[in-house]
Amino acid sequence: MNPALWAALGGVAALLLVLVGVALALLVGGRREARERDALAAARADVEALRAQLDELSTELVTSRGAAALVAPQVEYVITSAGEPATASADMPPVDDRAVLSVTLGEPLVKVAALGFGVRRALSAESRNRIAFAMRREVKRARKERRRAARRTRVAQARTAGAEEAA
């Protein structure tokens, strides 16, 4: 057969493959778009249901607050009421000054005691001796390692010098 015919058949086959690929892409894209539309519609329906529920709850709250305002007067709590006589309510027992002072000074006092204990333990003779021993041992180990490295370097240099003289 003629090579030009083979080239033409190959071109047609490639064109067919491209067309099939485009058709599949359009088909898959259409399905994906339909799924996205369905998901968007479901999300909108959920939002509407939640909005209706929120409206219902807010109207319930407004009506219950109105009824509660008729039953008990609203008491305003202000943190700047220092110096005014304390009024003990049923749900809050009175707190004496000794308890407030204990809580206020207790935590910093515990922190200072813990710091003092740690400093005293770190500066003890036993701790200092242990650290000094570890330092001496580390210095000796490093010195031996440097000596070994220097010895290996000298041996390697002697070998290379001997090899150069032999050549």
Image (cartoon, grey):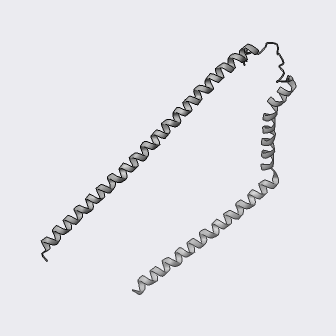
**Horizontally, is 105 left or right of 53 in the view?**
right
Front residue of 92 and 104: 92
Q: Quadrant of residue 92?
A: top right
Q: Position of residue 80 (x, y in %)?
A: 72, 16
At 71% across and 64% down in the image, what residue appears?
137
Front residue of 129 and 95: 95
Q: Is residue 76 visible?
A: no
At 57% across and 75% down in the image, what residue appears?
151
**Horizontally, is 40 left or right of 49 in the view?**
left
Q: How many marks?
A: 0
Report the quarter where the N terminus lies: bottom left
Query: Looking at the picture, does residue 116 appear above or below residue 165?
Result: above
**Horizontally, is 69 left or right of 25 in the view?**
right
Q: Position of residue 97 (x, y in %)?
A: 85, 23
Front residue of 156 and 63: 63
Q: Quadrant of residue 83?
A: top right
Query: Looking at the picture, does residue 106 appear above or below residue 91?
Result: below
Q: Quadrant of residue 86?
A: top right
At 50% across and 77% down in the image, what residue appears?
156
Query: Looking at the picture, does residue 122 appear above or below residue 5?
Result: above
**Horizontally, is 11 left or right of 68 in the view?**
left
Q: Position of residue 48 (x, y in %)?
A: 52, 32
At 34% across and 53% down in the image, what residue appears?
27
Report the quarter where the C terminus lies: bottom left
